[in-house]
Image (tube, rainbow, N blue to C red):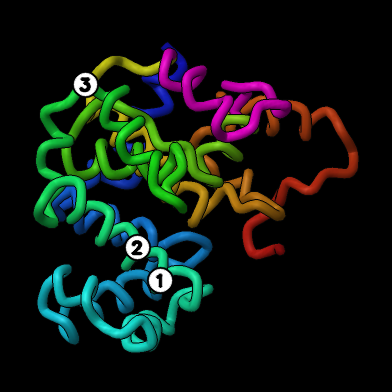
């Protein structure tokens, strides 16, 4: 019930997130570009790929240097460009065309396993594709979700994001919309309030549900920002 209340408050504060309009292949490319990269840089790189090459087939067949130049705004374009092209070639070889819509018809576990075979596609990336594009009930656990779930006391701090995924998933309804609201809400909260360093506890609407805040209140010295404007 606490997770449902957290989700309700996230939606109340930030609004219900809109579903992605990207097909599964486009979503996969977008998430691969996003690794260790800010949202605005990811969006710029994705847009440049679409504008410069016009199709994922053209990205697949282009000189790697041209793809790298198009995505130069992201972190590690020299790794991401050849990786993207390798994945696009593998999909073409296996499926005969660059289309991953079939993933939306598979059981979640099969879809995750199929995507996770590719280099650079971990559990979070695979879950993002299935949740965002296919609207399947699977929770991606990124750094924001992991950090805030620990602070809220939903999971043990000893758990890695991969280990935390099934634990958090079990706390949520088997409903893609509820999972999406929880995931996106925590991502936004991590970007706007519950920062990695000096979280803004004084203005957090979840603090009465937060184990980190409760512990901080019992200590004299804390890294939890107690007043607006500090940090």
Identify the mark nearer the N-term, 3 or 1: 1
Front-most of residues 80 and 202: 80
Q: Picture coordinates of residue 70 (x, y %)? A: 33, 85
Secondary structure at numbered mark 1: helix
Please report the residue visible at 13 percent of the width from the left and 56 percent of the height from the top.
98
C-beta proximity under 8 Å, tags 3 and 1: no
Q: Picture coordinates of residue 22 (x, y %)? A: 15, 55
Question: Disc 2 versus disc 3: distance between alpha carbons?
Answer: 25 Å
Q: In the rendered view, would you say 48 is above or below 130?
A: below
Q: Picture coordinates of residue 201 (x, y %)? A: 63, 44
Taking 98 as reference, is 208 left or right?
right
Region in magenta? 152-170
Please report the residue visible at 27 percent of the width from the left and 16 percent of the height from the top.
174
Q: Which mark is residue 86?
A: 2
Please report the residue visible at 56 percent of the width from the left and 24 percent of the height from the top.
209
Q: Which residue is mark 3?
A: 107
Q: Which residue is mark 1?
A: 82
């Amino acid at each position: 019930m606490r997770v449902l209340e957290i989700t309700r408050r996230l939606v109340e504060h930030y609004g219900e997130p809109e579903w992605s309009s990207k097909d599964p292949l486009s979503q996969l490319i977008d998430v691969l570009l996003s690794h260790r990269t800010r949202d605005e840089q990811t969006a710029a790189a994705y847009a440049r790929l679409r504008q410069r090459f016009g199709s994922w087939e053209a990205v697949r067949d282009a000189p790697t240097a041209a793809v790298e130049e198009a995505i130069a705004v992201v972190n590690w374009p020299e790794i991401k460009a050849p990786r993207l092209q390798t994945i696009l070639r593998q999909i073409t070889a296996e499926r005969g065309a660059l289309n991953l819509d079939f993933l939306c018809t598979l059981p979640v576990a099969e879809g995750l396993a199929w995507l996770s075979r590719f280099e650079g596609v971990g559990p979070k990336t695979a879950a993002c594709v299935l949740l965002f594009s296919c609207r399947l009930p699977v929770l991606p656990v990124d750094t924001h979700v992991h950090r805030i779930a620990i602070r809220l006391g939903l999971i043990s701090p000893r758990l890695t994001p991969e280990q935390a995924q099934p634990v958090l998933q079990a706390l949520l309804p088997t409903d893609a919309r509820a999972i999406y609201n929880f995931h996106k809400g925590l991502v936004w909260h991590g970007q706007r309030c519950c920062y990695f360093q000096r979280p803004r506890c004084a203005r957090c609407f979840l603090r009465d549900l937060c184990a980190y805040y409760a512990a901080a209140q019992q200590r004299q010295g804390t890294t939890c920002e107690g007043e607006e404007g500090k940090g």
